Image (cartoon, grey):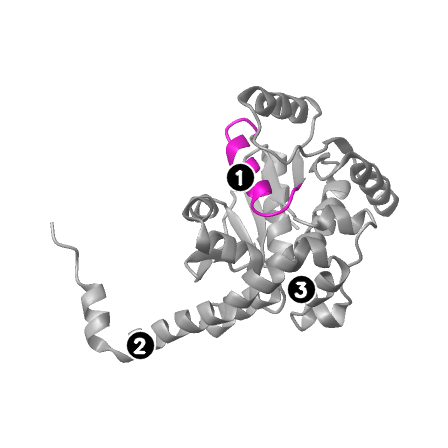
Amino acid sequence: MSTDGPIELPKKGLILGIGISITDYAEVTDQVMRAAQAQRLLLVTACDVHCLIEAHDDPAFAAILAHFHIVAPDGQPVRWGLGWTGQAALRERVYGPTLTLHVCEAAAARGLPVYLYGSRAPTLERLRARLIERYPALQIAGSRAGRFRQLSVQEQRDDAAAILESGARIVLVGMGCPRQDFWMWHMREQIALPMLAVGAAFDFHAGLVAQAPPVLQGAGLEWAYRLSREPRRLWRRYLTQTPRYLPLMAAQLLQLRTFARDPDTREADARPCPG
């Protein structure tokens, strides 16, 4: 994996109006390593169906995602959506917890320290121990539990100072969508480093929450497994938000087919705007 030369960001396809990066684990990891070595800002998030629906409903969140360098297709239905719309036929998704391991492995090999931000203090302690057990050469420069509320300007400055003074080159952020993405966006001018929003990766790799079996993940049924394990916390997300994805995708596909069949629509869209 080369880390020389400029960063060339992956192209994006549109799903429900949100730009989703057409990429894979190797490319995202390579982008992160390049940015880490150059100490350049790189905003990366792993976008699943929950993330898409949140952005669809919240223009402010959608605007932030539009400026992220990489919005990885975290969920299988998001990967499928790129295929259904003819924009990309990806062989696999870029799942936040798995991406976390790829990045930690590469960072350990290159001596690039990582910083863990988010979750709770006990979770971070377990996560640190397990990551070092898995990757003995991994340098964890520091960690800070999330506050899960709006931070003051001074608190943001304190967080930025702690991260930069730690010597970290990569920041992994686990506070859930969209909180983690908003935090990274607000910190982008203070922390010129790659920052990755990885969702539930902290809980999974700390051993506090079980991941769905691979067969369910591959079938796009991870949501059902997670709902069965944490119904009180996740019922609203998976029973009121997630079911909206397929009807919204159907509407996008209908729009695309109508556009493809209607020459008048294509000609109108191709005309230059007046003025």
Q: Is residue 260 above or below residue 167?
A: below
- Mark 1 and mark 3 in contact (Cβ < 8 Å)? no
Mark 3 vs mark 1, CA separation in Å: 23 Å
Q: Pointers 2 and 3 in contact (CB under 8 A)? A: no
Left or right of residue 163: residue 79: left
Check disc 1 and report the residue beneath it: 182
For residue 156, above or below residue 114: above
Task: Look at the numbered disc 2 and give the secondary structure of its residue.
Answer: helix
Is residue 160 within the magenta segment? no
The residue at the point 75 percent across, 68 percent down is 214
The Cα atoms of the two marked residues, 1 and 2, are separated by: 36 Å
Residue drawn at 57 percent across, 19 percent down:
154
x and y percentages locating residue 105 in the rendered image: 76, 47
Which range is magenta? Answer: 174-191
Residue topped by disc 2:
258
- The amino acid pointed to by label 3 is Trp
Residue 223's disc is 3
